[in-house]
Structures are given as structure tokens and as C-alpha cells.
Image (cartoon, rainbow, N blue to C red):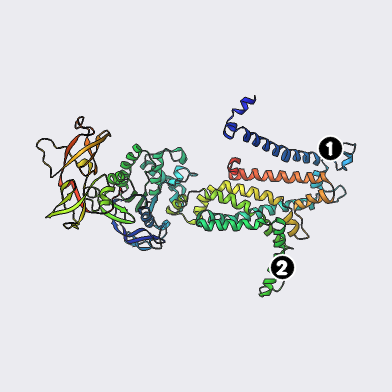
């Protein structure tokens, strides 16, 4: 059983500080939904509002269309997985998993049975008698998930639970979390500052900045069509090119910058007018070395400064005519041995792979 | 040999001078202030009571008479047992246990509040207001309680004044003043170990329990108390030992009809000039205290290292 979660105009204030400001979002039952944002953007506050540890100063939280105000965390159909997991160190793994059943007065035999079922779900059969400290990082992670699932919550809330793991394990746990979510088929609400995590696991994400949601949408849409400069630079990497709007033509928009004019498709907001200050964004992987016969909507002259080898790709750092620095990545499969610092090149990018947005704060500032 | 000693981690970590100071200080404290006096008392408790000048003379011999006196009373007594002393002893132990439990029940909620609920400035204020009364000498604090609890004291006068009672409550006669005084006397020794233990609990543990559906009471029972166990045992042993050995508070606050065991010891030493018997009674009290500590450790399955932490 999964449930919809709805935040209606939710604000949380601490004194005069808005930790969350007029947040509106409807998360569908069975969805894997992520709140993505830098630390201090209010995403944990929202999670605490959903779990019941934090009362909203304004607005309401609805779970299964039921207003949750006045209902404590121990009475909500939600389970929270803490950033540090908060497993109980003095209890065995089974006792940890069955704790929510113990407090509901479930008999010892039934508790044991359910704990064993869950141990199987997380592939830790027969390890119920161990103490928590005897488990590895990834195993602890899975026990925390099993413990949260034991009462069959309708919504599972996850507060950056992977942040303490090393890279390989983190990547494996992403897949596992996604699989567990499909198996138990309940709503997962995930909090993270790691865009890789959010993009790989989620059905939809909400990008947050300073207490407000900047954009909500499916991962590829948020990545390909950011609606604000903050989203453009926080989700993935992006090169900003500052300029002024020169032409608007149906769904194409042209920007004039010191490094030339660039064309991009207009996003759905259509907020820009001719003469407005704007930024054209192009991602490092969308900049190409033109080969014979290639034609691109946009061309740009660069002067290579340095490069680094990352394995699957090679990153180049270059300056434009105006002194603006940009980064571009070439797959390792392409021979780039002739490019070194001081090389002058022309790069190309498609209008569909770039966004022109009204000038505003960047995530990298 | 000397070189070998100085290469030990303890010396490397602290430096030669500091390490030697530590060693000397600890050895001095332990040997001269703990072991030798206790051994001397132990020896004395098995000797006949003779004036100092007769020590080592023919009248000075080893005997069990002081321990026998504690159990069976004087040789001229007609009773089968020394009901008076045994009674005082039993009551002292029993009341000390009750006082310790009362102390724990009183301190736990406050310690929890300071450690986990109060904001930092409130917590500081509360800790300071707990400590300040203890700047005053124990004897004076006891007298202050005596003034509160006396038959014509502040509480009785107030209650008769507003008409709640028409006769004074005999707080001192029924030892209510004594019990209150004993609970109050060592409250900090319960409060701080408890506070330290609870403070070190990750707040997420409490929230996780709550999120999983646990009531507050059960969260305390299953999460907070097990975590705070070393602090509880540490506080209880300290409070018990000091209560069972308290002298000033009972002298001021106990009713004229009852005695506290240390008062008995005091009488043997100072009023009856019988140091041997006083020593024997002290040794009995010491043994009981040690048994209590070991029992607490056994019951709560706590190791000595955890208590000192």
C-alpha cells in the first residue's frame, strides 16, 4: 500500500528565517521522489515536516488525502531512515528490525517471523542475532531499510542515507534501493545533495534552493531543460555564457555575448524579451569538435588552457575571446592526442542542447 | 631498567616529568590515604580495646569480640542478638537503598530534560542553579532543612497559617526531614553521571524510536535507560555509599529516637573511646558498600570500566 503525499503551501520558519517557503508539491503513490539541493536548502526540514518531527508554520501536509496536523511521528504512516541510520546499538539486528512491531505489542514469535522475512528481503538471512556493530556499512544500511519497512509504512522517507558510504557501495546501494522500492511498491521520498543519486534513482525530482522549489519534473527533463540558472548549474555541470537577448523567433531565441551570438530553443516559461540580460548554458558533454561535414547551430572559438584525464572522458579547460572560462568533455574513444595547452579550436553545439535563461543566481557562485 | 621504563607509552605520551608526577601522586594517594589507614583499621578491629600506652602489652591481644558484639550484643545482655545495633544497621541499609532509588527517580527526568530537551542556555541555567546550593556547607544545608521541617518551622507555620492543617506535622519525629535531607545531600552525584550518560545518546536514536511508533515511556525503557545504564549504576553506587556513610545530615535531621549507623560508629570512636569497636563497625559498613557495588554491577551487567567512564 502506498500513499500520495501532498505539501500545500508549506512554510517552516525559525524566527525570521524561512527554512522552507511556500512549498507546493504532490508526490504520487508508489513514486520514487527526490528533493535535491545544497545543504541548508530546506530539504531536511521538509522531510521532518512530512514525518511529523517539525510542524509547518504555515500550510499543511496531506498523506493519503488526510491532513496530518496534530498527528505525531509515531502515529503517521511514514518511516524515516536517518542520515546516520540511528540503528539501536544495544539491540540485535532482529530486535532492531522488529522494534516497530514490539512497540505495537506483536507477539515474540510473529516478530521473529517478520524479522526473518525482512532479513531475506535485504539478503541478510541468518544474521539476525548479530549486533549492529558487527555489520559492514552496506549491511547496516540495509538493516535500517528493513527496520523502516517492518510496519509496512505507506511512505518511506530517506534522509541522505548513502552519504556515509564509499563510492562503489553507494553506487550499488542506489540500484538496490530502487529494486527494493519496486518490490515493496510504496512511496519513497529521498533527500540528497548528490545529483547523481537523485537522477539515477528517482521518477521525479524537485530541485530546492534557499527553502524554495526551483523546478519539479522527471530527471531527464530537469537535466535537459532547466528552468532557472540555479537548476542549470546545480544539476550536472554547465558553462554559463552571459549576454543579452537579441532575437526571439517562434521557439528559438538568440543571445548576443562578447564571444558571439548563440541560438537555443525557448523553454516553456517564455519569460524573456529582447534586450533582457540572459545566460546561455551549454553542458561540457554537449560541446563537440566539428569533423568534416558536421554543421552545428552554434560555433565557438576556444583557446585550450589545460586538460585532465578522467577515464571514460577527457576534460578540457579553455578560455574564450572575452576571457570567460569553459569546460568541455570528449569521450576517451575519440583521439585527442593533438590537443594540448595553447591549441586554438572551434567547438560546436546544437540549439536543442543549450538553454537560454533570464539572468539569476548560479549554484556555483 | 630505568631506560626500559621510560620507553613505555605512558611516559612517551605524558613526558618524563609529568608521568613521574602522576605515578608518585597516585601511589601516595592510594598507599598512604587508602590502603594503610584501612589496613590499620582492619588490624585494630580485631584487637582488644586498650589505652594507647598498653599497646603491645599483655592486655593487647587479637579477638573477634567487636564483631561478636555487633551480632550478639554485650556479654551481660540477656537478648539472643544485638537487636539495637543490628536494627540501626538494617534500617540504615534499607533507608539508603530507598534514598538511592528516590534520588534516581527524582534526577532522571531532570537530567533527561537538561541533556536532551532544554535549549543550551536553559540547560546552563539549570545546571548552575543545581550547583549553587552546594556552595553552602553540608551542615548548614541540613540546618536549613531543619528550620523548614521543625514542628514550629516554616512549612508547618505556613500550612497552619493558611488553614490546611490545625496541628503541626511531625516531620522530624517521623524522619521525613532526614530522608529529604539525605536525598538532597548527594543529588549532584546522581545528576551528573546521569546527565553525562544521557547527553551522549544520539538524539536520532530517540527520534527513530518515536518514528517507529514507540511511546515516550517505551522509548525511555528500551532506548534511553539501556544507554544510560552505566551512568545510572555509577550514580546509584556513589549516592548509596555516601548516604550509608552520611554523618552530618543524620546528626542534624534525624529524630531523637533513631540513629544512623555512622552515628553509632562515631559514638564508639569519640564518646566511648573504643576505637577497636568503631573500626569493626566501620569495616562492616565498608564490606556492605562493596557488596552493594558488586551487586549493582552484576544486576545491571555493567563493567567497572563503564561506570568510571
Q: Position of residue A334 (x, y in %)?
A: 19, 32
Say which chain tag 1 marks: B
Secondary structure state at the residue bearing disc 2: loop
Name the quadrant containing residue A136: top left
Who is closer to the viewer here, A150 or B270? B270
Residue B8: x and y in percent read 59, 29
- Residue B62 point in image, percent of width and height: 84, 37
Is residue B1 shown above or below A61?
above
| CA neighbours of label 1 inside 10 A, class few (<14), some (14 to 19), many (20+) | few
Name the residue rendered at 68%, 38% in the picture.
B25
User: Would you say residue B263 is visible in this rendering?
Assistant: yes
Q: Residue at x 72, y 65 (%)?
A: B147
Task: For mark 1, give the secondary structure.
Answer: loop
- Comparing labels 1 and 2, the label whose residue is closer to the camera: 2
Q: Are marks 1 and 2 on the same chain?
A: yes
First-in-chain label (1 vs 2): 1
Residue A290 falls in image quadrant: top left
Q: Chain of mark 2?
A: B
Q: Is residue B12 above or below residue A186?
A: above
Residue B71 appears in the rendering = no
Q: Which residue is mark 1?
A: B62
User: Between residues A125 and B249, which one lies in front from this camera angle?
Assistant: B249
Which residue matches tag 2? B153
Report the Cα–Cα distance between label 1 and label 2: 50 Å
Q: Are marks 1 and 2 in contact (CB under 8 Å)?
A: no
Residue occupying the far top of the picture: B1
Amino acid at each position: 500500500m502506498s500513499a500520495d503525499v501532498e505539501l500545500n503551501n508549506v512554510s517552516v520558519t525559525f524566527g525570521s528565517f524561512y527554512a522552507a517557503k511556500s512549498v507546493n508539491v504532490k508526490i504520487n503513490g508508489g513514486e520514487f521522489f527526490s528533493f535535491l539541493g545544497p545543504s541548508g536548502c530546506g530539504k531536511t526540514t521538509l522531510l521532518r515536516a512530512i514525518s511529523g518531527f517539525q510542524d509547518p508554520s504555515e500550510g499543511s501536509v496531506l498523506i493519503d488525502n488526510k491532513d496530518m496536523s496534530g498527528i505525531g511521528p509515531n502515529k503517521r504512516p511514514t518511516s524515516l531512515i536517518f542520515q546516520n541510520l540511528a540503528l539501536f546499538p544495544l539491540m540485535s539486528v532482529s530486535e532492531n528490525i522488529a522494534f516497530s512491531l514490539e512497540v505495537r505489542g506483536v507477539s515474540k514469535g510473529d516478530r521473529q517471523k517478520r524479522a526473518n522475512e525482512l532479513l531475506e528481503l535485504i539478503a541478510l538471512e541468518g544474521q539476525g542475532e548479530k549486533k549492529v556493530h558487527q555489520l559492514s556499512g552496506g549491511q547496516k544500511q540495509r538493516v535500517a531499510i528493513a527496520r523502516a519497512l517492518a510496519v509496512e509504512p505507506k511512505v518511506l522517507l530517506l534522509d541522505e542515507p548513502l552519504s556515509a558510504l564509499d563510492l562503489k557501495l553507494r553506487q550499488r546501494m542506489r540500484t538496490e534501493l530502487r529494486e527494493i522500492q519496486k518490490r515493496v511498491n510504496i512511496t519513497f521520498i529521498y533527500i540528497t545533495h548528490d545529483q547523481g543519486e537523485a537522477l539515477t534513482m528517482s521518477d521525479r525530482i524537485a530541485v530546492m534552493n534557499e527553502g524554495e522549489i526551483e523546478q519539479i519534473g522527471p530527471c531527464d527533463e530537469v537535466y535537459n531543460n532547466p528552468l532557472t540558472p540555479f537548476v542549470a548549474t546545480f544539476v550536472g555541470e554547465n558553462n554559463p555564457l552571459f549576454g543579452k537577448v537579441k532575437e526571439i523567433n517562434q521557439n528559438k531565441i538568440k543571445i548576443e555575448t562578447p564571444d558571439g551570438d548563440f541560438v537555443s530553443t525557448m523553454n516553456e516559461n517564455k519569460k524573456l524579451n529582447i534586450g533582457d540580460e540572459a545566460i546561455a548554458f551549454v553542458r561540457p558533454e554537449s560541446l563537440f569538435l566539428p569533423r568534416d561535414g558536421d554543421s552545428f547551430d552554434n560555433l565557438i572559438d576556444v583557446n585550450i588552457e589545460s586538460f585532465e584525464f578522467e577515464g571514460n572522458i577527457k576534460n578540457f579547460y579553455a578560455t574564450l575571446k572575452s576571457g570567460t572560462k569553459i569546460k568541455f568533455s570528449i569521450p576517451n574513444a575519440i583521439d585527442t592526442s593533438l590537443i594540448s595547452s595553447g591549441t586554438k579550436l572551434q567547438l560546436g553545439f546544437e540549439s536543442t542542447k543549450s538553454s537560454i535563461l533570464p539572468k539569476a543566481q548560479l549554484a556555483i557562485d | 631498567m630505568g631506560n626500559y621504563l621510560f620507553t613505555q607509552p605512558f611516559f612517551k605520551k605524558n613526558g618524563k616529568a609529568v608521568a613521574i608526577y602522576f605515578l608518585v601522586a597516585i601511589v601516595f594517594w592510594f598507599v598512604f590515604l587508602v590502603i594503610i589507614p584501612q589496613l590499620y583499621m582492619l588490624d585494630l578491629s580485631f584487637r582488644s580495646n586498650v589505652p594507647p600506652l598498653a599497646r603491645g602489652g599483655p592486655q593487647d591481644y587479637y579477638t573477634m569480640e567487636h564483631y561478636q558484639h555487633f551480632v550478639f550484643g554485650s556479654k551481660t545482655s540477656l537478648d539472643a542478638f544485638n537487636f539495637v545495633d543490628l536494627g540501626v544497621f538494617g534500617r540504615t541499609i534499607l533507608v539508603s537503598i530507598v534514598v538511592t532509588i528516590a534520588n534516581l527517580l527524582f534526577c532522571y527526568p531532570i537530567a533527561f530534560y537538561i541533556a536532551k530537551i532544554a535549549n543550551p542556555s536553559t540547560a546552563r541555567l539549570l545546571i548552575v542553579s543545581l550547583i549553587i546550593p552546594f556552595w553552602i556547607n553540608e551542615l548548614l544545608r541540613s540546618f536549613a532543612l531543619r528550620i523548614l521541617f521543625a514542628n514550629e518551622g516554616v512549612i508547618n507555620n505556613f500550612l497552619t497559617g493558611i488553614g490546611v492543617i490545625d496541628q503541626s506535622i511531625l516531620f522530624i519525629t517521623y524522619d521525613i526531614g532526614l530522608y529529604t535531607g539525605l536525598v538532597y545531600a548527594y543529588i549532584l552525584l546522581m545528576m551528573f553521571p546521569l546527565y553525562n550518560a544521557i547527553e551522549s545518546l544520539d538524539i536520532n536514536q530517540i527520534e527513530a524510536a518515536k518514528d517507529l511508533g514507540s511511546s515516550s515511556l517505551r522509548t525511555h525503557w528500551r532506548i534511553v535507560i539501556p544507554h544510560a545504564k552505566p551512568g545510572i549504576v555509577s550514580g546509584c553506587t556513589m549516592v548509596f555509599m555516601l548516604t550509608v556513610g552520611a554523618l552530618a545530615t543524620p546528626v542534624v535531621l534525624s529524630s531523637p529516637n533513631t540513629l544512623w549507623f555512622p552515628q553509632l560508629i562515631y559514638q564508639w570512636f569519640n564518646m566511648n573511646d573504643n576505637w577497636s569497636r568503631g573500626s569493626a563497625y566501620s569495616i562492616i559498613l565498608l564490606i556492605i558498600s562493596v557488596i552493594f557495588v558488586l551487586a549493582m554491577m552484576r544486576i545491571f551487567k555493567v563493567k567497572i570500566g563503564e561506570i568510571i567512564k
